[in-house]
Image (cartoon, grey):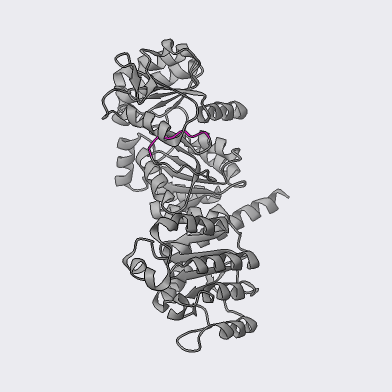
């Protein structure tokens, strides 16, 4: 059964030909957005717009109905009125289509009548050997097979997969993350998840060689036990980052009207996902930061952290954040203190933890890398967090060399590339320009250096990295 499921999903992710229902000669049709997204992503297969009133849409030959298409079709993208969905599904079954993305809403999220129509459609599809994604969803993105649900999605191949019950959040994460140098292997918007759900795709991604990290936005599942069993197994092979919403009464009401899912108790979810080795995040910005921490993870041996900073106030705030998240401020050894004293300025600095490099660190590009490497050689230090006020190429290159030399987790907190401070200092310090930012960040991620927006988010990400390392280690010891 597992092999069959994986084969079915793999066929959907790698279609040889795709049919589009709901396309039109008019430009303001959602079906056109889906067709344009495939073209924009560079899909190499055959695209078949279906519309009896058109001969060509976006320079693609148009067909009156599915049976007129001369070749086989693996995937159908359906963006028609809810009343027409059942008829389109029947056409797909007659054609032997393997999978369908139902973008159309107006089903299980609307109430009992909508749920019944949704169940009837799924039952009909499953009986004919076709799998459904949706309804009420955006569908699929794959950087490998060049399929997409929105224009402008990252073209570079990545190692992170994202599963979402929200289509808009899948769009937002893809575009938001691209600006920060992140690329994805696959993304799925499951919507109402009437047939294939988050758990099914999680199982598939657990076996996917192109995916190293799995991120999820989830409102609820119909079978919580199966989700946790699958997640527990997958998390031993690759980390799972979960943004779970709908814990409060207000959130649960929103979930029911959005995708019709069952949200469940927040306290029960917290306990269950922790037992399964899942890392929980709270918002979109945090999710991106956590992804960077788990993309090329160097697992920490313990929770002793050293903070290296130019600005003193930010370092104190980082110390508070780290201790709140269960990290321990390390005490640098005597040799470490002597070496630090040999490279940092004499005045306005400190060799105790947090280590203060002073404003000189913005001018002297050797200070951050030197301090990181010295602290990394200290056996009392497990993790290094650097607060880098001005991101310069020379500092980035030095940090990567230092990380390679010490082989310990290194994270940095830095100002966004579009900040007023960063922009005003560009000519003075030679900071990274906005257009260069994604590429520079990608270099850091590939070297195993995570990048964070705030000290609180960095502390949570690093603490979660410790939790995951402990979880995997404990389960492996138990199995022995």
Describe residue 421's horizontal placement relative to residue 308 as left or right: left
Q: Where is residue 91 drawn, in percent x and y? A: 41, 13
Residue extending farthest to the bottom is 347
Please tell me which residue lies in front, 87 or 218: 87
* Residue drawn where x is 49% and y is 16% of the image: 127
Residue numbers of the magenta segment = 145-151
Point 59% across, 38% down: residue:
208
Residue 194, quarter of the rendered image: top left
Q: Residue at x 56, y 68 (%)?
A: 398
Residue at left 51%, top 60%?
A: 450
Q: Is residue 146 magenta?
A: yes
Report the predominant secondary structure element of the magenta stretch.
Answer: loop
138 left or right of 291 in image: left
Total numbered labels: 0
Residue 261 occupies quadrant? top left
Query: Which residue occupies the foreground of this view, 232 or 207?
Result: 207
Q: Quadrant of the N terminus?
A: top right
Q: Is residue 189 visible?
A: no
Asked if residue 417 shows in the view, the reply is yes
Residue 340 position within the rendered picture, expressed as x and y whole percent measured from the top left: 57, 82
Which residue is nearer to you in this view: 436 or 313?
Answer: 436
């Amino acid at each position: 059964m597992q092999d069959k499921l994986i084969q079915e999903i793999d066929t959907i992710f790698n279609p040889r030909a795709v049919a589009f229902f709901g396309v039109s000669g008019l430009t303001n049709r959602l079906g056109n957005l889906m067709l344009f997204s495939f073209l924009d992503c560079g899909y190499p297969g055959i695209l078949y717009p279906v519309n009896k009133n058109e001969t060509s849409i976006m320079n693609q030959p148009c067909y009156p109905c599915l049976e007129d298409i001369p070749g086989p079709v693996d995937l159908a993208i359906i963006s028609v009125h809810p009343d027409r969905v059942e008829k389109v599904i029947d056409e797909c079954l007659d054609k032997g289509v393997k999978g369908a993305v139902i973008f159309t809403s107006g089903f299980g999220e609307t109430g009992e009548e909508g749920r019944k129509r949704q169940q009837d459609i799924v039952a009909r599809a499953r009986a004919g050997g076709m799998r459904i994604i949706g309804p009420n969803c955006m569908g699929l993105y794959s950087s490998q097979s060049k399929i997409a649900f929105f224009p402008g999605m990252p073209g570079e191949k990545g190692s992170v997969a994202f599963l979402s019950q929200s289509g808009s959040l899948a769009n937002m994460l893809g575009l938001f993350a691209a600006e920060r140098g992140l690329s994805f292997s696959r993304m799925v918007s499951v919507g109402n998840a009437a047939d294939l759900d988050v758990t099914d795709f999680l199982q598939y991604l657990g076996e996917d060689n192109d995916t190293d990290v799995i991120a999820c936005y989830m409102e609820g599942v119909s079978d919580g036990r199966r989700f946790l069993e699958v997640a527990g197994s997958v998390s031993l092979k690759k980390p799972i980052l979960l943004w779970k919403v709908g814990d409060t009464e207000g959130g649960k009401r929103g979930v029911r009207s959005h995708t019709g899912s069952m949200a469940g108790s927040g306290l029960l979810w917290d306990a269950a996902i922790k037992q399964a080795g899942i890392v929980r995040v709270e918002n979109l910005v945090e999710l991106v930061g956590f992804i960077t921490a788990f993309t090329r993870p160097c697992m920490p041996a313990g929770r002793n952290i050293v903070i290296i900073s130019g600005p003193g106030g930010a370092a104190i705030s980082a110390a508070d954040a780290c201790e709140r998240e269960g990290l321990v401020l390390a005490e640098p050894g005597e040799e470490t203190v002597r070496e630090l004293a040999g490279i940092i300025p004499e005045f306005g600095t400190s060799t105790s933890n947090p280590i203060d490099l002073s404003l000189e660190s913005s001018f002297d590009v050797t200070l951050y890398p030197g301090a990181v490497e010295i602290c990394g050689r200290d056996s009392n230090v497990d993790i290094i967090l650097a607060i880098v006020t001005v991101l310069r190429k020379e500092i980035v290159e030095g940090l990567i060399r230092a990380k390679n030399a010490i082989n310990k987790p290194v994270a940095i907190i830095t100002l966004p590339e579009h900040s007023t401070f960063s922009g005003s200092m560009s000519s003075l310090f030679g900071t990274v320009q906005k257009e260069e930012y994604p590429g520079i960040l990608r270099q850091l991620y590939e070297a195993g250096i995570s990048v964070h927006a705030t000290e609180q988010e960095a502390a949570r990400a690093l603490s979660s990295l410790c939790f995951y390392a402990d979880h995997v280690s404990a389960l492996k010891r138990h199995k022995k």
